[in-house]
Amino acid sequence: MPAKSKARQKAAGAALVATGGEQPKFKLKGASKEMEQSMSEKLLAKFASTKRRNLPEHKD
């Protein structure tokens, strides 16, 4: 399941970095914080690896 927008792809990337321990989890905000708490690391990696070409900035 790829990300549907650039914003979701960025949020998944931030959550993945925090899950891996490279960034403290307390620095996460908004969607990335929710994603980190509710998604597995494997699913976060799948969202974060989505190609950004032809994705809208935000999904309504």
Image (tube, rainbow, N blue to C red):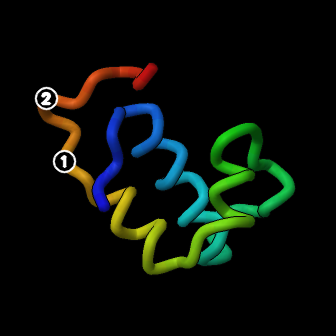
Above/below status of 56 relative to 44:
above
**Residue furthest toward the front?**
60
Label 1, secondary structure: give it: loop
Answer left or right for 16 relative to 58: right
The residue carrying mark 2 is 54
Among the 4 quarters of the image, the one containing residue 55: top left
Among the 4 quarters of the image, the one containing residue 24: bottom right
Judge the density around disc 1: few (<14), some (14-19), many (≥20) Cα neighbours within 10 Å: few
Residue at screen point 56% across, 64% down: 17
Of the residues shown, which amino acid type is indicated by label 1? Lys
Residue at screen point 38% across, 58% down: 47
Residue at screen point 46% across, 40% down: 8
Among the 4 quarters of the image, the one containing residue 5: top left
**Residue furthest toward the left?**
54
Residue 4 drawn at (x, y percent):
33, 40
Label 2 near label 1: C-beta < 8 Å? yes
Of the residues shown, which amino acid type is indicated by label 2? Asn
Above/below status of 26 relative to 39:
above
The residue carrying mark 1 is 51
Residue 45 drawn at (x, y percent):
40, 69
Residue at screen point 73% across, 51% down: 33
Q: Quadrant of the C terminus?
A: top left
